[in-house]
Image: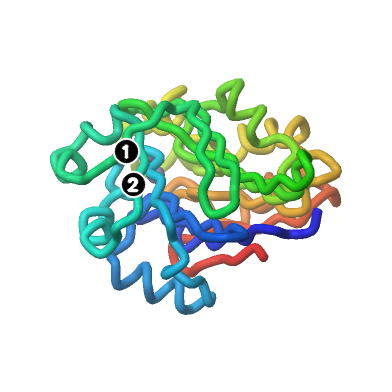
Amino acid sequence: MTPRMHLFILASGSKGNAAVVEGPTGSVLVDCGLSRRELHRRAELVSCDLSRVCAVLVTHEHSDHTSGLSVIAKHFDGPLYATQGTATARTHLERLPFTCVSHSCSLELGGMSIQAFPTSHDVSDPMCFRFEVREQGKVADAIAWATDTGYLTQPALQALRGCRVLGIEANHDPHMLATGPYPPFLKARVGGNSGHLSNVQAAEALPQLLTDETETVVGMHISEKNNLPELAAEALRQAVQDRAEVLLGSRAEPLVIW
Ligand SMILES: [Zn+2]
Ligand SMILES: [Zn+2]
């Protein structure tokens, strides 16, 4: 696939999440768990032009995905999309002028066709997205990722398949989670069906998601306490072998996939 879109993962992890997908005629910001200042600083580092952002999509209400939204919304007059569940889940979100959509909605933004799909997380009505550019009725480019999900739902598996850029959560190493500092209830939450995907789960899912179109696999939402980047990368590399490059989204610095 010749890239028609570019992905800027400005932050990924429990300290904050924000990503920009740049399409042919505009960009979309997915989540904003960074301050406005930090968002702009990181975007500048990777030459991501935030003035092209024509819409904001919100996956779910957790603060690592929404803490910067109120301030961003003050300086932005485009639409903010979230499910009704997300839009009404927290007081600071209730005040924002959301356009409510279903977790299976289709949107056309920035020259991209966007398909939402449901995730499984301990929040109100979460979703993630697949981005496509179509030319002459065919998919010319596709990017999708899924994070904050205890398992991959059927629609998620379908959406992640056949992407040029495929992002998948590799939140924790099961052994590190089991022996780590979290209290038992939190260990159960993170490792449960409404928590986060582990390195092992991501690696197990990958063989059925990779196709000839897949060029880049990105491990995302890597836990600071229950994982190591090396472990996540190793698990993904073993699953991917030489079929695609493996990169990691980071909480500390932005990552661009051109
Ligand atoms: Zn999160
Ligand atoms: Zn979350």
Mark 2 — residue?
80
Q: Amino acid at mark 1?
A: Thr
**Residue 141 in the image: x percent, y percent?**
72, 50
Q: Earlier in the sequence, mark 2 or mark 1?
A: 2
Tell me the residue at 42%/31% (across/down). 195
Q: Residues within 10 Å of mark 2 (few under 14, many from 20)?
A: many
Quadrant of the image occupied by residue 239: top right
User: Along the horizontal axis of the image, is 237 left or right of 229?
Assistant: right
Residue 26 vertical placement versus 196 (above, below): below
Q: Which mark is residue 169?
A: none
Q: Residues under labels 2 and 1: Cα distance? A: 6 Å
Tell me the residue at 45%/72% (across/down). 43
Q: Quadrant of the C terminus?
A: bottom right
Q: How is the image coloured?
A: rainbow
User: Along the horizontal axis of the image, is 166 left or right of 242?
Assistant: left
**Residue 142 in the image: x percent, y percent?**
68, 46
Give ligand 2's quarter of the image: top left
User: Along the horizontal axis of the image, is 102 left or right of 248?
Assistant: left
Q: Are marks 2 and 1 in contact (CB under 8 Å)?
A: yes
Q: Nearer the viewer, residue 32 or 194?
A: 32
Tell me the residue at 63%/37% (across/down). 202
Q: Nearer the viewer, residue 152 or 174?
A: 152
Q: Amino acid at mark 2?
A: Leu
Mark 1 — residue?
99
Tell me the residue at 38%/26% (across/down). 188
User: Along the horizontal axis of the image, is 174 left or right of 189?
Assistant: right
**Residue 164 in the image: x percent, y percent?**
73, 49
